[in-house]
Every structure is written in C-alpha cells, then in structure tokens.
Amino acid sequence: MEWEYNDYELDNRLNNMMWTISEDYGEESNDLKRYANVSKDLAIYFAVKTGARKKYVDWLTVKKYISYKARRGVNPDILVPFVEICLDIMVEDKLIEERPGVKDIRNKGYEELLKQFLKTHSSTLMEKIRYAWVFEQMGKSVQFDRQVKGILRDMLECKNATTTKEVIVLMEKIYTKHFSQEEDYFVEIEDQLIEQVQQQTLSEDNNGDFQDFLYEELYKDNEVSQEISEVVDNMNGSLLVESLGDFSKDTSAMDNRRIFVDQETADKIYDKISYYYGDPFLSKEEVRNIERKVCSNAHDGCRIHFTDGVLRTDNDNAFQKKFVSRQRENNLSFYAQNPRVNKRNITKLKQMILRTMIAESEVTKIPSDNGVIVANKLWKIGRSKDTKVFNKVLKNEKGGYVVDILLDASGSQRMNQGHVASQAYIISEALTLASIPNRVMGFSSFLDYTILRRYRNYDSPRSENKNIFEYYSAGNNRDGLAIQSVAQGLLKREEENKIMIILSDGKPNDIIISKVAQIGLKGKVSYKGAAAIKDTALEVRKARKSGILVLGVFTGKEEDLHAEKFIYGKDFIYTKNVDRFADIVGTFLKRVIENY
C-alpha cells in the first residue's frame, strides 16, 4: 500500500496521533513508521497504541516489577511475555473504549500482517496464549486446550485495572496461581525471603496487605539493570502481534541483520572497541595471526577482541565501569543467596574429580615372566611349575587435563546472568582446587567484532576466580568464530587431554557490517539460521578432529534442540535448569577421565 505523503508528513501525522491519545506533547518518536512498509492501518494503529501506552502505563514501575521477579529467579521465558500480554490487555481495553474506531483499523492492520507470515509460532504455552489473545481481539475463534483458555480468562481481568499498581497486583495474583509451580527452571525463593514476607504481612495494620508490601518492594532498589530496561523498552516499542510468526522472504527487510557504514565510520567503531570492552591482552601481531587463521569463509572480514574487561585494564570509560561493577555486585548477591549450598557443590565436584583421577591413576601389578623381581617368590625356581617370579607394573598414564569453559554472553542470557556466573564460578573453583588448569571466557559480538572476555587464565591463582562475577550479557553471538578462536589457545597447551565446555541458550545469530566501498564486490550470507548452525557445527568438528573434547550444554528452548544436536552431536546435554550446569560438567569430566 502506497502512502500519499512523504516521510516528513508521515512522521508528523503519526506523531500527532500519538500526542492526541497520550495528551503529552513533549516527546516525539522517530520509530512510529516501523510498520509503514507492511500496512498503513498497522502504522496508524501502532501510533495510537504508543500514545495509549504512554498514557496508561508507568514503564519504570514495570521495569522494577520485572527486576523484582528476576531477582527471585523466575523463568524469563514465561514472565516477559506474560507481562507483555497483561499490559496489552489493559491498554487495549482503555484505548478501544476511548477511541472505538481504532478497532477496525487494528483488525485491518492485523489481517495484512498475518498474511505475510511464513510461519506462525504457537508451540509453547506463552505463544499459544499470545496467539489466542490476538485472535480474540479480531473476533476469531481458535481452538486451544483448557490450560490456555483458563490462563487467558484470568489474564483478561487486567481490563479492570485502572493504574499500573493495580495491574501489577493482578499480574502477581495470576502469575502465582498459574506459573509458580513451573519455576523448577530456576532456584526456589529463599526461606529467608518467605519468612520476611510473612513477618511483614503479620505486622501490617488493617489497611495494608501483601499486595501493598509487593508494591513497596519494587522501590527498595532504585536501579534497574540495562538488560531488563532494554526488554521492557522493546515491549513498549513494538506490537505484540509481530511476534506471532516469521515473515516471508518479501518482507525480510523488517529483520535486516546487515549494517552498511562508510570507511570513516568503520574506523571509528574499531577505535572504540577497547573503550567499551577493555584493552586487549594480546598484542596486535598475535591477534592478526589468529585472525588470519580463523577469520575466513563465514567469518571473512570479521575481527576478534581478546580482553580482560574494563575493570581489569587501563580504561577511562566511567559509565561502562559502573555498569560492569553493578552487574558484578548483582551476580555476587545472587551467589550469596545460597552460600552453604554453593560451597557444598564446590566440594562435591572437587572430590568427584579427585576420586576419579586417583582411581584411574592406580598402579596395577600382575605376575609375569619378566619385569620387577619379587624376592619372596624366588623359592619357586626349580621347585614349582609356576615360574612367574616377576611383577609387571601397569601404569595408567593418561597425561594431564586442561579445561576451557566458554560462556555465551550474548543478550539472550540477560535474565540468567546471576545463574551463569555462579555456576561458572563453582566449576572453576572445583577445577582449581583439584589442580586442573582451567580458563573461563565469555563470548559475544559487537558489529563484526567477536568479543572474548577472559575472567581467569589457565594457571591463574585461585583468587582470580572471583573475576567470573564480572560476567554480563549483551549483543549477539557468533559461536563458530568464538569456538575456533578459543581453540587456538587451548591447542598450545601441553596437557594430553584438552577439554572445551560451551554453555549456550540459543542458536548462533549475528549481524554483518559491510563497508559501503565493499557493496557489490562481495556478497555475504547473514550469520543466522542454517548458515550459522552449519558453520558452528563445522567448527566443533574441527576442534574435535584436532584432539579437543567438546561438550555442548544447551539451556534454551526445546524448539531449538534439533539445531543444537546438529552442532554438538553425541556430546550434547539439554537442561532447562542453568543451575545444573556444574553437575553436568562434573558428570562429563568423570566420563572423560574414565574413558580417555
């Protein structure tokens, strides 16, 4: 559908619609025309919906609520879409009541959008609920099971909320009713917290209740993490219907993963890498040597940045230092919630490794015709048919062990940061106490740079393990290049048994940055989907062929399992619970020590 006016007129028209609904004329939005290439009606609907969201929702309070729940270990795959749908129900009801004509515009826009979906998502519970809600808005009947209908029926109570506080109280009630039993994905709420809530409830006067306590809790910590802030901003800046499916090829521009910049801009980006991520711990020549080996084929034109992070290098980026320091404190606080359990897990893992190594290193002696003479058997010579007066000593010499732990530090892990950091610390502590050299690194990508943040090196003292709590997640992930780059250092180690353990929660996905001067000279396939999966699988097989034992631990969605199995093959474990990472690694190491 063609627009009858230019971009400037379009911006003005959509902003006027937003202002009319929100009754706030102090802010413009440049993103209102994001759906204009799909449908005129959808663009208009998005503008008025944005205005209604500004009018009816206190988004800072929403961020605090999600932070509150995240600190208590809820499942983000349920919480985030749950909050999004509840808020959509509340806002939609008030918008249609105020502007009834919006309903027809919305339905026309939805129809045009749904026609362009190549595939719809309705496999997980929350996807089904989202699907059912969108089609209920359109007056269409969709058959779902009792669970979906029951949850959506309760969520529709959010229509009755008139303030953000009221909708949060309703969300907490509904979430507790339907989802609290499914939180085995994360740790249970601490007994201490439960006692605190009970004491607070008992001490309240007749005008107070647990709902007031919950709302007050949101304001105890004024800081909201950057990751949660981005999640909520994305929720506020898009239409819920967009996540119902994947677009067909002719609308793929809406998911453009290629960025074009000129040479000057590219040079500035490269100059800023150290400023944002910390100075490199390898020299330029060492990095170039590695890039010549690994930055080819799917990674042609990519670059690598090895760093110890902004806190342990000479860096003057005060904002980034503050951000990483705050996340480190959050991770440490999360770890401190279960000090005895964590200490017990470290000891348990260390003892299992040591016992297995001792058992496998035992010396076996068998009677033989040659070898080490046994003095008390010499009398048999000439007197017995048994002439085996020697012992042959069989030593189980398996060589040493060295371990690389590679953590997915892309933005998809933002709700699991405390869990990932704690589990990595437990594993590294146990390995260090068992005298097994180990290195822990996180990987993510920024434009065409793959960032490899080192938290501890192979032979670092035990005190360096605490650096693991500097783990934070942001950006994309180019798994194949990260695996190949880390393998370069691992292969230089003298230990006979080289092990790489990779924790990931999603399929490889990265953007491509192309300099304007290169456009038309060389085509690149986006690093996502089948291309990224095949490349990562190839790098895993290369590492194994070179003598590295690779284990993939996947904590993502079941729908991505086939991709992860293709990547890692038989040495692959799927778990919904990140907190089982240490146990899984222990079992794998035991098997390696016994069988290799």
Image: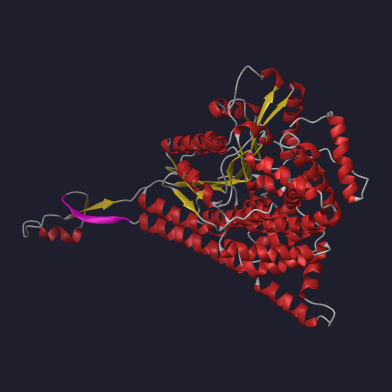
Quadrant housing residue 114: top right
Q: Is residue 365 magenta?
A: yes
Please state the horizontal and vertical placement of residue 103, each as a whole percent of the image.
Answer: 77, 50
Q: How is the image coloured?
A: secondary structure
Q: Position of residue 313 (x, y in %)?
A: 72, 41
**Which of 591 and 177 lies nearest the eye of the viewer?**
177
* In the foreground, 75 or 586: 75
For residue 520, above or below residue 162: above
54 falls in the magenta region: no
Q: Examine the rendering and report whether any part of residue 59 can be seen.
A: no
Q: How many marks?
A: 0
Q: Which of 560/311 is in front?
A: 560
**Percent from the top left, x then y, of residue 110?**
70, 45
Q: Quadrant of residue 341?
A: bottom right
Q: Position of residue 181 (x, y in %)?
A: 59, 68
Secondary structure that dominates the magenta span: strand
- Residue at 53% of width from left, 56% of height from top? 581
In the picture provided, is 366 more to the left or to the right than 249? Answer: left
The picture quadrant where one finds residue 547 is: top left
Please, which residue is most extreme toward the right here?
Answer: 25
Per the rendered image, the range of residues in magenta is 363-369
Q: Is residue 390 above or below residue 31?
A: below
Seen from the viewer's position, the closer of residues 348 and 529 is: 529
**Would residue 515 be visible to someone looking at this image?**
yes
